[in-house]
């Protein structure tokens, strides 16, 4: 590692270098998924908290399974069996490549409409791994299993019908619906069903009553002050540190804050890093409330929204790949290579490197926990 360069770094740059070393180690050891999983869990908690009013309202009104079954029979959920052909555009670098992908998808749609065997078309044209072996067949899907444009297109088809070209963030798809079957009541999205049965006003009132009593949050000011000091030093945040507790149970610890911190937009996070203890306490209380309420939602049987988690995971995996590409990190790197790339990334004035360093800073607490701060003293 260029020691002279490290010796001349300002404190902020030393912290950025430590971030990059830790991130590089995660990429080199292929452990980035475990690094981002706590963030995925926290981001998916938003759906749990949003579900609370309907469940609390149903409890207050005494809504039972009989009423829910009757409502569900009128409008059940569906599970779809779909085959598709996809021409991928995620890595397309030019408008011409995107136009070519669209043109091939349109050709496939025309051939399928003319009666060509869809499995054969998938084997020949689809760029999805394993499409040829499966004839383009996907695992049966329910709402949330696929991105919304894909689901909407599939749900409008009759069995045996083929769609026009469907653009999504991944590419251009042509779909054929093989089968449509009702989801059993026991497996249905209970939150969605309760929202149909419980009036919004009743749900809101029940949530307000619960929030003012059982949903209260008790903040620990000394613990918040400790976090404020850690933000300045860049040290790890102990999981044993309890920053808040719920009025009737539940706690918000260092690991919860570390995951929540990663979800803050860069501008807001930088403002909090410079803010006084009172401003930081306001954010901590809000984040603690979301975390503890989500745990209460799980405790009363509300299921995590798999679609929210999948979306968050894909987004974070994409960010990780982007940061790794900017700095040149890749699996299998040796320690010396990681250090060299980290120093280069810290000193780089390129716009991409500056932006990636700012974004990566959001993971600082998680990185410090997984990879304790290295000694960067000259």
Image (cartoon, grey):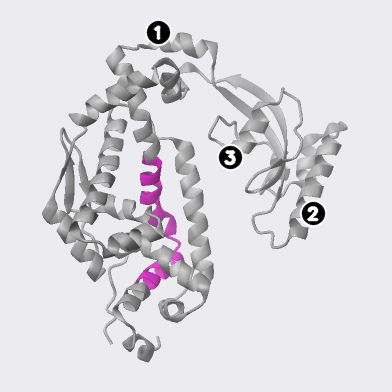
Q: Of callouts 3 and 1, which one flags the residue occurring earlier in the amino acid sequence?
A: 1
Q: Magenta span has 340?
A: no
Q: Secondary structure at mark 2?
A: helix
Locate residue 150 relative to residue 302 in the image: left or right: right
Residue at the spot of label 2: 100
Which of the two residues, 83 or 273, is positioned nearer the viewer here?
273
Q: Residue at (16%, 60%) from the top-left corner?
A: 226
Residue 81 locus on image (x, y percent) = 64, 29
The CA distance from mark 3 to mark 1 is: 32 Å
Q: Magenta span has 30?
A: yes
Residues rendered magenta in the picture: 19-45
Q: Is residue 196 visible?
A: yes
- Cβ atoms at labels 3 and 1 below 8 Å apart: no
Quick check: 250 above or below 373?
Answer: above
Which secondary structure is most common in the magenta stretch?
helix
Q: How crowded is the residue under tag 3: few (<14 C-alpha within 10 Å), some, or many (20+)?
A: some
Residue 174 locus on image (x, y percent) = 74, 39
Residue at the spot of label 1: 66
Q: Residue at (58%, 31%) from the top-left corner?
A: 141
The CA distance from mark 2 to mark 1 is: 53 Å
Locate residue 89 relative to residue 245 in the image: left or right: right
Quarter-of-image position of residue 275: bottom left
Q: Secondary structure at mark 1?
A: helix
């Amino acid at each position: 590692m260029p020691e002279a360069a490290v010796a001349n770094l300002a404190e902020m740059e030393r912290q950025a270098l430590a971030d990059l070393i830790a991130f590089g180690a995660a990429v080199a050891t292929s452990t980035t998924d475990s690094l981002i999983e706590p963030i995925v869990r926290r981001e998916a908690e938003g759906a749990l908290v949003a579900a609370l009013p309907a469940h609390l309202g149903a409890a207050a009104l005494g809504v039972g399974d009989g009423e829910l079954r009757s409502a569900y029979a009128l409008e059940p959920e569906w599970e779809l069996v779909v085959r598709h052909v996809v021409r991928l555009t995620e890595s397309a670098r030019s408008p011409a490549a995107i136009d070519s992908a669209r043109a091939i998808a349109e050709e496939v749609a025309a051939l399928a409409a003319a009666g060509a065997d869809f499995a054969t078309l998938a084997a020949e044209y689809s760029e999805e791994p394993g499409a040829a072996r499966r004839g383009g067949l996907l695992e049966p899907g329910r709402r949330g299993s696929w991105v919304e444009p894909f689901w909407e297109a599939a749900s409008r088809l009759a069995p045996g019908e083929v769609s026009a070209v469907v653009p999504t963030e991944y590419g251009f798809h042509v779909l054929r619906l093989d089968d449509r079957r009702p989801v059993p009541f026991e497996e249905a999205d209970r939150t969605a069903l309760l929202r149909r049965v419980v009036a919004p006003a009743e749900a809101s009132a029940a949530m307000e009553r619960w929030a003012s009593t059982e949903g209260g949050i008790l903040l620990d000011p000394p613990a918040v002050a400790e976090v404020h000091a850690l933000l300045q030093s860049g040290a790890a945040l102990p999981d044993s540190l309890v920053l808040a507790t719920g009025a009737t149970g539940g706690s918000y610890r260092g690991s919860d804050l570390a995951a929540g911190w990663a979800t803050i937009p860069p501008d807001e996070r930088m403002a909090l890093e410079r803010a006084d203890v009172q401003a930081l306490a306001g954010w901590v209380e809000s984040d603690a409330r979301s975390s503890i309420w989500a745990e209460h939602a799980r405790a009363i049987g509300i299921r995590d929204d798999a679609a929210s988690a999948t979306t968050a995971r894909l987004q974070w995996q994409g960010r990780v790949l982007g940061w790794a590409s900017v700095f040149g990190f890749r699996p299998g790197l040796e320690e010396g290579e990681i250090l060299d790339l980290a120093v280069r990334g810290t000193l780089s004035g390129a716009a991409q490197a500056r932006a990636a360093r700012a974004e990566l800073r959001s993971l600082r607490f998680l990185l410090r926990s997984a990879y304790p701060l290295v000694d960067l003293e000259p």
